[in-house]
Image (tube, rainbow, N blue to C red):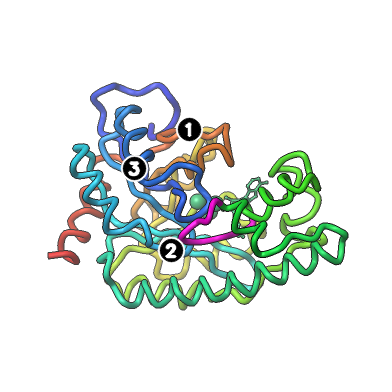
Amino acid sequence: MNSDSAHDINEFRADLHCHSTFSDGTLSPEQLVSLAKERGLKGLVITDHDTVEAYPSVLKMAAAAGLSCITGVEFSAIHNGVNVHILGYSFSPQNSFIHELCQRHQQRRLQRNQAILERLAENEMPITDEELLAASDNVKGTIGRPHIALAMVKKGYVSDVAEAFRLYIGEDKPCYVRGNLFSVEETLSIIHQANGFALIAHPHLIKHSQIIPQLLSMNFDGLEGYYAKLPSIQNARWVKIAQKKNWIVTGGSDFHGDIKPTIGLGSSWTNEETFNFLKQRFEQNTQ
Ligand code: AMP
Ligand code: FE
Ligand code: FE
Ligand code: ZN
């Protein structure tokens, strides 16, 4: 059992998937560290979208708070026209392959955000660059669709973030633009060049399940088997698939703070053995 609120208070629990203000989370890395302590977590990994800006400083904050912490990131990627999120772990925070990929993502996102703003303007919902920056509280890392959604709320175009996705900027909605995503294979190879681990994030959320067998035949190191508040029967399905392949199974909440208010930090977690396995590689990469 790696999810649900019923757990032994002394059980080792590490949340391996959450977002900070360096992407679309509403809590800063410091606030995430203190919340993790408050929740009784023993380990935490911040996995911001397409950026590692929270590192290395969050490692020091976590150490000072007595929380085990390693590097992590969540890369957006594409396979056969389907969006796939990939979790990367254990790389050095200074690794140049990872930094270069993050930079390419930031360029991609600048163009893509502009294209989404153009679509919104065509639909009588203009948002200026300044308004987008203000709505994202001048985020230092990744500006994505949730920030565009917040700007839409601020301008009164929609009543909340969920409505912005449901009507306009969600996949296949009139103002959605995918942008030029990088392939799953390329992303995997970059994480491996950095001697990190690459895992399929929230596999149940992949829109077209036809690509799952193809992903399972790639050289991922594991998958996220326990996710947020996913029912245990669904978790069990993915855990079984991973175990068959001898893959790593992690768990995480995908906590975003107020942007997704129903998901709590630590609602799913990773056990001590798996966390230590990832940590060992992290230490090897940062010696
Ligand atoms: P992007 O990476 O810019 O395409 O934005 C994707 C992010 O938007 C996801 O990681 C989620 O955090 C967020 N998101 C997707 N759908 C919704 C939704 N319906 N409500 C709120 N946030 C969402
Ligand atoms: Fe997100
Ligand atoms: Fe994701
Ligand atoms: Zn996430």
Left or right: 109 in relation to 195 = right
Image coords of residue 20 (percent x, y): 44, 48
Location of mark 2 (residue)? 51
Q: Earlier in the sequence, mark 3 or mark 2?
A: 3
Q: Are marks 1 and 3 in contact (CB under 8 Å)?
A: no
Q: Residue at x 25, y 33 (%)?
A: 12
Dominant SS of magenta comes to loop
Report the span colored magenta.
137-145
Location of mark 1 (residue)? 264
Q: Amino acid at mark 2?
A: Thr
Left or right: 135 in relation to 183 = right
Q: Amino acid at mark 3?
A: Glu
Mark 3 secondary-structure assignment: helix
Location of mark 3 (residue)? 30
Distance from Cα at disc 3 to Cα at disc 2: 17 Å
Q: Is residue 202 visible?
A: no
Against 17, is 76 above or below? Answer: below
Mark 1 secondary-structure assignment: loop
Q: Is mark 2 within 8 Å of ligand 1?
A: no
